[in-house]
Image (cartoon, grey):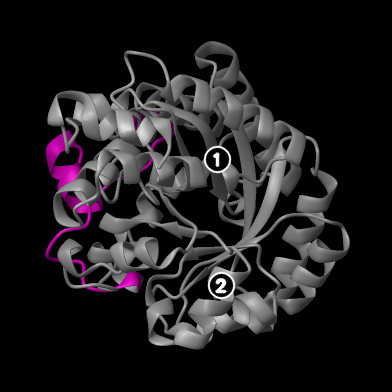
């Protein structure tokens, strides 16, 4: 048992943290979609500025439209809301603003390191080329780093339901921006009926250029999707991995090889991967020893923050303060950063846990 765990269990007999106490903790968000994290007020303002027609203009009604609720029962339905946010993400200035505001929102939530993922191909409706899209995001993130002190990295996404040749093109873009703010490559989109292995050429290029990669898998399809991500695409991390428990041998493989899972609790409930938070396998994965991280996925669609996800895990999965510390540390260990930088950042986090104002 670490000193911080002893401290957390001994201080005033406290076995739970308030949401504000959780916000004070240093955190990562390794699975965060830019087009799923737009402020509702910004969405309305930019739509008016660009002449974009929204289904609603009242903030609360629009929020009800884009946020997951009873009307959403699958990943396909959940993804429809992205058509709305993407409608105002076709100009460089607007893309940069949304990236900057995401940094501000993440930092207000106590996030120290944020990996932002998006697919540049989805931001070309008004003629932007792929490089200009990436540069727009990077400008916003650099300004966010400057003004908030947060650390960021970009993950470029291929899309399962778009032809594999496009994923290869996006992989080439990723390689071009390696070391210039882009830290990894991903495969996102509609999981069932669109096998990850179809995009193996893109991941071959990524792998042979020593770029870290992750793959959405085990969210809307079973462990076979995770197996493809690991063995056909050589993923370093798995986005979600919720259904990994259905294949015990594969689960052991992921555990033995310390493959991090980018878990997104609320999102998994919203798309129907699990029926309720109480039934989420996160608790089992953590107890088994898997490297698990907690992330937002889509701050707008799932109406969440990293702190709120941790608070829900505490409430529904009986996560203790000491266990929360371990999970936060796993997040920093799993970052797509060079080892020396990751180690330096982790030391700062461990020092922060020892300070009196940190509730451990």
Q: Secondary structure at mark 1?
A: helix
Task: Please state, as top left, top right, bottom left or bottom right, where the N terminus lies in the image.
Answer: top left
Q: Nearer the viewer, residue 202 or 319?
A: 319
**SS at mark 2 in the image:** helix
Q: Is 63 within the magenta?
A: yes
In this rendering, position of residue 313 left or right of residue 91: left
| Residue 292 colored in magenta in the image | no
**Residue at (78% x, 52% y) in the render:** 173
In the rendered image, the vertical position of residue 334 relative to residue 170, given as above or below: above
Residue 139: percent from the left, percent from the top?
65, 26
Q: Quadrant of the C terminus?
A: top left
In the image, is residue 332 above or below residue 243?
above
- Where is residue 276? Give x, y as percent: 16, 67
The residue under label 1 is 332
Give the quadrant of residue 328. Answer: top left
- Would you call the spot at circle 1 few (<14 residues within 10 Å), some (14-19), or many (20 or more)? many
Residue receiving disc 2: 254
Q: Is residue 273 left or right of residue 238?
A: left
Q: Residue at x 35, y 36 (%)?
A: 5
Q: Please tell me which residue is depicted at 39% across the width and 55% down the height of the picture.
A: 82
């Amino acid at each position: 048992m670490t000193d911080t765990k002893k401290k957390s269990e001994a201080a005033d007999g406290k076995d739970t943290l308030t949401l504000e106490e959780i916000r004070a903790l240093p955190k990562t968000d390794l699975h965060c979609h830019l087009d799923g994290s737009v402020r509702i007020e910004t969405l309305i303002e930019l739509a008016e500025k660009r002449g974009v027609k929204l289904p609603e203009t009242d903030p609360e009604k629009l929020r009800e439209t884009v946020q997951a609720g009873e009307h959403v029962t699958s990943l396909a339905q959940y993804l429809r809301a992205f058509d709305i946010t993407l409608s105002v993400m076709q100009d460089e200035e607007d893309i940069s603003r949304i990236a900057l505001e995401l940094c501000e929102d993440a930092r207000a939530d106590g996030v120290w390191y944020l990996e932002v993922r998006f697919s540049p191909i989805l931001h070309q409706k008004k003629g932007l080329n792929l490089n200009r899209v990436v540069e727009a995001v990077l400008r916003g993130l650099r300004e966010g780093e400057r003004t908030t002190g947060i650390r960021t990295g970009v993950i470029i996404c291929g899309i399962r339901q778009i032809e594999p040749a496009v994923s290869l093109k996006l992989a080439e873009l990723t390689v071009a921006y390696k070391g210039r703010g882009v830290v990894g490559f991903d495969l996102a989109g509609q999981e069932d009926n669109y096998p990850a292995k179809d995009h193996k050429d893109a991941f071959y290029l990524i792998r042979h250029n020593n770029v870290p990669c992750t793959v959405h898998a085990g969210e809307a399809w079973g462990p076979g999707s995770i197996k493809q991500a690991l063995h056909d695409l050589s993923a370093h991390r798995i986005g979600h991995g919720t259904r990994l428990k259905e294949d015990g041998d594969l689960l052991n493989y992921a555990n033995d090889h310390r493959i991090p899972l980018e878990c997104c609790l609320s999102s998994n409930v919203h798309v129907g991967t699990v029926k309720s938070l109480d039934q989420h396998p996160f608790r089992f994965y953590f107890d088994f020893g898997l490297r698990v991280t907690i992330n937002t996925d889509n701050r707008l669609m799932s109406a969440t923050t990293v702190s709120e996800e941790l608070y829900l895990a505490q409430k529904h999965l009986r996560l203790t303060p000491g266990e929360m510390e371990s999970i936060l540390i796993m997040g920093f260990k799993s970052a797509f950063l060079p080892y020396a930088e990751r180690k330096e950042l982790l030391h700062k986090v461990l020092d922060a846990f020892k300070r009196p104002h940190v509730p451990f």
